[in-house]
Image (tube, rainbow, N blue to C red):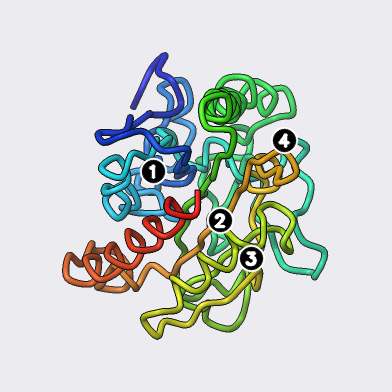
């Protein structure tokens, strides 16, 4: 458990700095000390719904000159990719987990008792303590790079179980590129990413069934030269044993694809 820590970690570029930011908002597994005892303990030992190992999958980013920000705390504390008003991201009837969820993706409770579930006052405190610092830091990074390079690309990285009935009855595609229906990035970045990701024969979808959560549309502003893309990918592309164990061999193939994609995007930048 962590006390009085920033809710994010920054990994600075190791190579020549590029105008690109990588965000990993759902890889956090920590719980603040003031909240940890409120949760079912065997649940938070290894919190489900985590985008496991994405820091490892994307660890090449700093060598390409990319600045990375990733979450420290679990999305069960607060979901950095939901709207601060806790409004639904879609209107097609699917179930969307809350800003401060009280169950996991399988509808299992995560708090010991209902009295520990966050009130409106507690949700507002978590917004101030954990949510806004992450978003404000992204804005700071974007503004700094924009001042230096004029054009910035923002990439929001996610992964999900191949099948989550609460969200969708059918299995998810391998890779899903989201840009809020072509609104968060110029078409040149979208097409470059789609073409690069499609080169290996994986099933690649565009804005279906995910078009980006709250982060992508809140950061992408192509009219002002800030372009944002979200990539969701199935966990079994880099995990085995029922999507619980990091599979190095699988992961290497995926890392090569992502690194190649980033090279093409940086060249476009």
Q: Nearer the viewer, residue 221 or 162?
A: 221
> Contact, CB < 8 Å: mark 1 with mark 4?
no
Q: Which mark is residue 84?
A: 4
- CA gap between label 1 and label 2 equals 26 Å
Q: Earlier along the polypeptide chain: callout 3 or callout 4?
A: 4
Residue at 43% x, 29% y is: 8
Residue 194: x and y in percent read 53, 71
Q: Dot 4: what SS?
A: loop
Quarter of image, res 234: bottom left
* For discs 3 and 4, the disc positioned in front in the rendered view: 3
Residue at 53% x, 55% y is: 104
Up-down relation of residue 250 to residue 214 (above or below): below
- CA gap between label 2 and label 4 equals 19 Å
- CA gap between label 3 and label 4 equals 19 Å
Quarter of image, res 229: bottom right
Q: Return the residue at label 2.
A: 230
Residue at 60% x, 63% y is: 190
Q: Return the residue at label 1.
A: 44
Is 202 positioned to the left or the right of 192 in the image?
A: left
Q: Return the residue at label 3.
A: 210
């Amino acid at each position: 458990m962590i006390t009085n820590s920033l809710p994010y970690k920054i990994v600075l570029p190791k190579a020549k700095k590029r105008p690109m930011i990588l965000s990993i908002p759902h890889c956090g597994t920590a719980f603040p000390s003031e909240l940890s005892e409120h949760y079912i303990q065997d649940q938070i030992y290894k919190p489900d719904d985590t985008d496991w190992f994405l820091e490892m999958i994307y660890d090449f980013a700093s060598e390409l000159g990319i600045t990375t920000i990733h979450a420290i705390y679990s999305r069960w504390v607060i979901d950095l990719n939901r709207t601060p008003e806790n409004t639904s991201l879609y209107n097609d009837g699917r179930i969307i987990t809350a800003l401060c969820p009280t169950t996991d993706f399988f509808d299992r409770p995560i708090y010991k008792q209902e009295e520990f579930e966050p009130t409106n006052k507690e949700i507002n405190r978590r917004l101030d303590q954990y949510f806004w610092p992450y978003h404000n830091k992204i804005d700071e990074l974007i503004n700094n790079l924009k001042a230096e390079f004029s054009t910035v690309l923002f990439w929001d990285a996610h992964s999900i179980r191949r099948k989550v009935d609460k969200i969708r009855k059918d299995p998810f595609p391998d890779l899903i590129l989201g840009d809020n229906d072509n609104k968060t990035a110029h078409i040149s970045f979208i097409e470059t990413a789609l073409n690069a990701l499609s080169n290996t024969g994986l099933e690649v979808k565009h804005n279906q069934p995910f078009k980006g959560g709250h982060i992508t549309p809140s950061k992408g502003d192509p009219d002002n030269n800030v372009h944002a893309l979200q990539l969701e990918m199935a966990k079994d592309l880099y995990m085995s044993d029922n999507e619980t164990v990091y599979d190095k061999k699988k992961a290497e193939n995926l890392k090569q694809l992502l690194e190649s994609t980033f090279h093409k995007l940086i060249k476009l930048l």
